[in-house]
Amino acid sequence: MSEPFPPSHAPIERAAASDDSLQRAHAQLLHYRPQLTRGVLLSIGALIAVLLAATLYFTHNAGGFDPLVANEDVCPPKGGFQAVTGPVTPALLGKRVYLANCIQCHQTTGLGVPGTFPPLAGSDWVTGPEERIIRIVLQGANGPITVAGKNFNGVMTPFAPVLKDDEIANVLTYIRSEWGNAAPEVKPETVTRIRSETAGRTAPWAPAELLEIGK
Amino acid sequence: MNNGLALFLGVAGVFAFSWGAFILPAHWQLGRLGQYRDPVDETLHPSAAPGLAAQGGEVYADLGCVYCHTQQVRQTTLTRLKEGKRAAFNPDFERKWAGDANQPRPSYARDYIQDRRVFLGQVRLGPDLRNVGTRFPDDQALYKLLFEPQAVTKDSLMPPHAFLFETRPIVGERSAKALAVPAPPGCEVVPTPRAEALAAYLLNLKDTYDYPEERRRNMLPSAAILEGDR
């Protein structure tokens, strides 16, 4: 048998790889696995740990970030803000009562409405004997009254049915210590006592009548 | 699957990385914010939105109000010339977006802790809505605006949401909820349940409670800002 083609053409005609050699190559590839050696695992672990530590560090020192601050101009003091959780004072409790019951007439500023509602700020009545103002709040007031040199004549509603003794004590303590007023606090016991003394009374007090009390 | 472990580690690493970068720090910084208990009357703030308002939040998300409205009052102090002198002012406060007019305040992080979805928004094509509940007296005023904004503000850019309302013949008496808008004779325009939920949601949007600790930290006399020369 003679060769059908000149030998120089042989590489084109015949497959370069036999079935055998292909299978051998595949077998080799199938066996090949990049080895996740301890070294590789350790460095991946180390990378993750470093990233985590970096995040924690950044978060912790985030330029003095404070979740309570919304004003971008605020610069927190060195060492951060000191939390203040002040004790709940009777005056603070009284402020609530005041805002809920008294501001329609005496206003949040305590200045009242000129000519209509007398001021509580700078009033001698407020800083004067507590027996009088407890009565005013309990049964209300009606009649000419002079407050801080001005004359008023109006009606104040009674609060005996609405407010409890400690609420009245607290609101009076509040108005006696706010807006520059400085007078001792009113004790709930005093309110209880005066409430029982005036138990039968429903008519509002006339200021002239009150001036006789606690002289 | 030859490299299952490597693949797994790779995927886990990518997720761990983004979790560590975005979730963990944010949670660390803000996650501890809880409701604040008022020391005097023992109420908790902020309170969760009541049921109808919570449903309205879904409508708000659904209709894409967030694309034109933000819900974040900012405390930025800018300066401008006033009578020849530099004066500090706060644009958001000046536009009456900051709740109580006597005690305006910015939105604090704590305000959002009860929100199922937080609609901070990015674009202010319309007004900020974080305190819209303080600006509208009742749902009727809101219905009127939603039905046809152009009837409230001439040439308003806000799209009408008339599809939230139903025009139906009056059967018996006029509905108490009917809108004061022109309707065909014998007909009335009434809000659908979606509109009612949306209005409840909007009316509930008001941050009026002021947290003492936040107030103390965010107060800054405007003089200090002028000094800082911004």
Image (cartoon, helix red, strand yellow):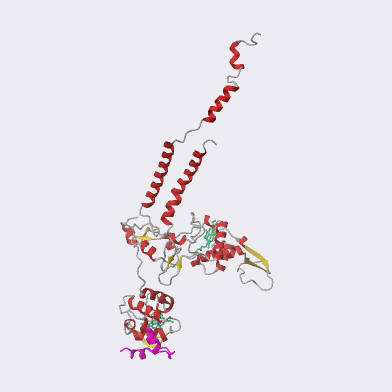
Q: In this rendering, is residue B43 above or below B63?
A: below
Residue at x-position 39% and y-position 49%: A56
> Which quadrant would the N terminus of chain A be assigned to in this image?
top right
Query: Which residue lies most toward the top here?
Result: A2
Quarter holding residue A98:
bottom left
Let me know if residue A38 is in the magenta part: no
B187 relative to A66 in the view: left or right: right
Q: Residue B173 at x, y = what percent?
A: 66, 73
Q: In this rendering, is residue A40 above or below B157?
A: above
Q: Residue A63 at x, y = what percent?
A: 36, 52
Task: Choose between B172 and A79: the one closer to the eye.
Answer: A79
Quarter holding residue B226:
bottom left
Q: Which residues are magenta?
A: A191-215
Task: Choose between A211 and A29: the one closer to the eye.
Answer: A29
Is any part of residue A62 visible from this angle?
Answer: no
Residue at x-position 61% and y-position 62%: B164
Q: Residue A158 at x, y = what percent?
A: 43, 84
Let me know if residue A196 is in the magenta part: yes
> Which quadrant would the C terminus of chain A be assigned to in this image?
bottom left
Task: Choose between A169 and B86: the one closer to the eye.
Answer: A169
Q: How many marks?
A: 0
Q: Residue A33 at x, y = what percent?
A: 50, 32
Is any part of residue B213 visible from this angle?
Answer: yes
B224 relative to B7 in the view: left or right: left
B47 relative to A183 in the view: left or right: right
Residue at x-position 45% and y-position 67%: B44
